[in-house]
Amino acid sequence: MSDSQAVVPTSSHDDIHSPALRHHFATEEQQRDSSSLGMWIFLATEVMFFGGLFCAYLIYRHWYFGDFGAASKSINALLGGVNTAVLICSSLTVVLAIWAAQTARRGIMLAMLALTMLFGLTFLGIKGVEYKDKFEEHHVPGATFSFEKVPIPSHPDQYANPQHAQIFFALYFIMTGLHALHMVVGLGIFSWLFWAAWKGRFTPDYHTPLEIGGLYWHFVDIVWIYLFPLLYLIDRHP
Amino acid sequence: MATATVPQVEREDYLNKEYGIASWLLTTDHKRIALLYLISITFFFFIGGFFALLIRLELLTPGGDLVQADTYNKLFTMHGQVMVFFFLIPSIPAVLGNFLIPLMVGAKDLAFPRINLLSWYLYIIAGIMMMHCMLTGGVDTGWTFYTPFSTAFSNTKVIEAGLAIFVSGFSSILTGLNFVVTIHRMRAPGLTWSRLPLFVWAHYATSIIQILGTPVIAITLVLVVAERALHLGIFDPKLGGDPLLFQHLFWFYSHPAVYIMILPSMGVVTEIIPCFSRKRVFGYMFVALSSIAIAVFGFLVWAHHMFVAGISVYAALVFSILSYAVAVPSAVKVFNWTATLYKGSIHYDAPMLYAFGFVGLFTMGGLTGLFLAALGIDVHVTDTYFVIAHFHYIMVGGALMGYLGGMHYWWPKISGKLYPEGWARLAALIVFIGFNLTFFPQFVLGYLGMPRRYYQYPPEYQVLNVLSTAGATVLAVGYLLPMIYFLWSMRYGKPAPDNPWRAAGLEWTVQSPPTTFNFPEQPVVTWEAYNYDEIDRGYQEEAQVVR
């Protein structure tokens, strides 16, 4: 994504072109298409990366459905729901920032980028609260893990198997943890985008980094859209 | 570029443009990065080779007399990990692919030059982690990290090795990403998909596997590391986890990884054979699409590594049939290479000798793969030396032969110097003989029942093991020779003309070695790939004019 950043060309160019065009591309269009395709391919690798986890999740959920339901019920679905809303809002602000860049509205672009980051930080803050709750309830897998005598939602006369619940929490922490890590990386990217926007790098003709960074942000949001029902809403019906 | 004269004044090229460490370590030139990779993977090749020699020395005698059993476990583990993740996977793509793809598609560089450099640094970081792991105790799980041994029982540095391979995976992903974007977006005007060199097609297929497969091994290693550190239970049957899930996830990458190693090599051979038989490649589109077919089918066969692991018989049946299906596109390639040779004007230069070696050894490796895809035979030979011999015929006889063939073929372009042809032919012969002497006896050993990964064996297996160890020694000589004469040629070799082989392809239209930005002006392609009939006619007419 930062590959489309301007550098001083090391070769002598006779033709005059935008300072954002790097030496090895013939046209700005070629450069934009390349950056965009590169990000899409990167997102394909991300799908496979999370895909391995989703595969593990689906197998164990199939095997240990009741235990997963009991464990899922112990997570605060309201906080997860609020976080889902926060992320959807952040996706909207990303799109608005790109629209503002396309229509040369600098103030709105900066405001929207700042709002996006604010939403991202809010998400991480709420996530932190959730993690703290889990830590206090001894639901973090490892030596101190405890999940005794928790009834299974669909069979209240039975207790969940703590070992199987531990697998749920292991997957919960790895999946949401990796997602949060992606959010942190996204915040880094958006800090850079904000700085570049502040410097006036982005114009209606050239705002590829915004689009590329936006693609990444949307992807991280979509991962959450899948994570939320899979982890928070198992067997929740009354 | 009609003449083969070498100018007297020194031209500026990518090698002599700048000097100094910084001009190399901070370069974004794909050709310099290729050389950085060349040096690093050669280093790891010799590390991995050193482990292999120790393994073969231990197996010279039936008793365990050279190393302890634990040490032996570490030796074959680290031999596998170094060779697979730090040599074979980066070998052709990161060196020859990096150097040649922009030249072959008529571009100034790869689409993302700085990401290209980043991928080398990730490789180096991973390599340092791996070296540190090996020097402070090593790993003994086998390169496959099978759970629950790796997560619950092994006392060695599993976490460190896992993280090293995790990091190296990202280097591989970024290389593949760069290639796909370059091939899609940076082709010269006129260079349609049906005119692309088949080397580029092969790398396109390879990149797809790198992009879609590598993230799965990355997340699998994350799970192994987390499981080992925290005892989560994900892969531990005692805690309700499923060790077979690990095998599925591991082989989902690690089987296609075999095609990451062999496809680029097939690409190299597909360049060499038309050039040295002066013929258009037979069935261009079939060869191109067979690469893609191998990449696609390669993703659907992973569980043939698990036939005896307790998967359902129906799953085994399906995976067995799909494994047979991969043989079809592979056979298409072999038949098309053979048909290209037919009535060709064949030249036995060193690259061609390696290409011949590749075709023969790959065919043997591939056909014995069919034995292993058969459910009944697989039960008999699973985890024996038959399997070892089979995949070494693919990875060493195939991938490495192609790599060496490609290094010889493009060495004049890379270094601007000619290697000594006589020595090179001798080395190709030594490698071929040494390879067969090393690994053919292992087929027999495996079929007779010698299991892999044991440091002792019954005395009746000794004769074949001695042959194998002797072969490994010959092979080592065969690998040392090219390194010596390549280095020698950099200083003393004759300057190479721009197109010493009268080969087709854009990379031969530029000077040897190329300039930093490859092409003085944007090339436009108006000819089909491998137009050797036209090229040779051009040379004949020129010769008549001179006369």
Image: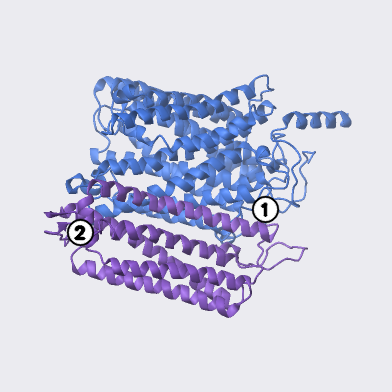
Chain colours: A purple, B blue
Indicate the quadrant containing the C terminus of chain B: top left, top right, bottom left or bottom right. top right
Q: Is residue B460 visible?
A: yes
Residue B190, percent across and down?
A: 73, 44
Q: Is residue A177 above or below residue B457?
A: below
Q: Which mark is residue A142?
A: 2
Q: Is residue B259 above or below residue A13?
A: above
| Apparent side of residue B150 relative to residue B290 in the rendered image (left or right) | left
| Apparent side of residue B422 relative to residue A90 in the rendered image (left or right) | right
As measured in the structure, the alpha-carbon distance from the residue carrying label 1 to the one carrying label 2 is 53 Å
Along the viewing direction, whichever of B482 and B142 lies nearer the viewer: B142
Tag 1 near tag 2, CB within 8 Å = no
Along the viewing direction, whichever of B50 and B90 lies nearer the viewer: B90
Q: Could you tell me which residue is drawn at 28 percent across and 32 percent down?
A: B312
Q: Residues within 10 Å of mark 2 (few under 14, many from 20)?
A: some
Pair 1/2: label in front:
2
Q: Could you tell me which residue is drawn at 31 percent across and 52 percent down?
A: B223
